Image (tube, grey):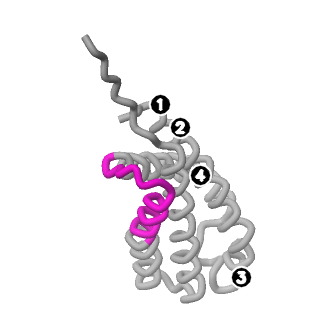
Amino acid sequence: MNIKRFWIAVLAVYILAQLTGYLIHMVMLGPTYESEGIKEIFRNMEEMNSKMWIMYVTDLVWVFFFTYIFVKGYENKGLLEGLKYGIYIGLFIPFVFAFQSYAIYPLPYSLIFQWFLYGVIQCVIYGMVVAAIYKPKEVSTSEG
């Protein structure tokens, strides 16, 4: 494993996760979260902000394993490998999270579907970034 490339990929995906998470949840879905009938389900902003460190830590753990699993199965097939990996993980994690949330919480289907769709898009982007950054260490062959 190329440790340096691995950690660069983890850092890049973590930064992307924070940026895309902000864009999706604060900008695109923010008004939905503030609408009547939905805002009562979530914690108030003050309480949420006091627990944001949990989001940062869990994002870091998630990104670490997202990258680690990619690296362990690395096949050197370029961006297409990252695209496929992103789709697989997107159908695995955001799909399960979104639709289980729909079964548990009284949230509108349109919001759940957006969580799923945006989650898949995020995973595809992350997969392509990891594929673009990660390259295994060159094995040096020396004649002796």
Where is mark 3, residue-wise? 35
Question: Where is mark 4, residue-wise?
Answer: 52
User: How far is disc 4 from disc 3 in space, using C-alphas?
Assistant: 22 Å
- Element type where label 1 sits in the image: helix
Residue for badge 2: 8
Q: What residue occupies the far top of the structure in this picture?
A: 144
The image shows residue 52 at horizontal and vertical percentages of: 59, 52
Relative side of 92 to 118, left or right: left
Say what secondary structure mark 4 lies in. helix
Do residues under tags 1 and 2 come within 8 Å of each other at their CB atoms?
A: yes
Q: Secondary structure at mark 3?
A: loop
Is the residue marked by circle 2 packed among few (<14), some (14-19), or many (20+) residues within 10 Å? some
Q: Earlier in the sequence, mark 4 or mark 3?
A: 3
| Near-viewer residue (60 or 124) | 124
Residue under numbered circle 1: 4
The answer for how far apart the CA atoms under marks 1 and 3 are is 45 Å
Q: In the image, which residues are magenta?
A: 72-90
Residue type (three-letter) at the residue carrying disc 3: Ser
> Extreme front residue here?
143
Query: Vertical placement of 87 versus 79: above or below?
Result: below
Q: Is residue 17 above or below residue 113?
A: above
Q: Position of residue 113 (x, y in %)?
A: 54, 83
Badge 3: residue crowd in 10 Å (few <14, some 14–19, many ≥20): few
* CA neighbours of label 4 inside 10 A, class few (<14), some (14 to 19), many (20+): few
Question: Do labels 2 and 4 touch, CB within 8 Å?
Answer: no
Q: Which residue corresponds to the image point at 47% horizontal and 50% vertical from the top-left?
A: 63
Of badges 3 and 2, the one in the foreground is: 2
Q: Tag count in the figure?
A: 4
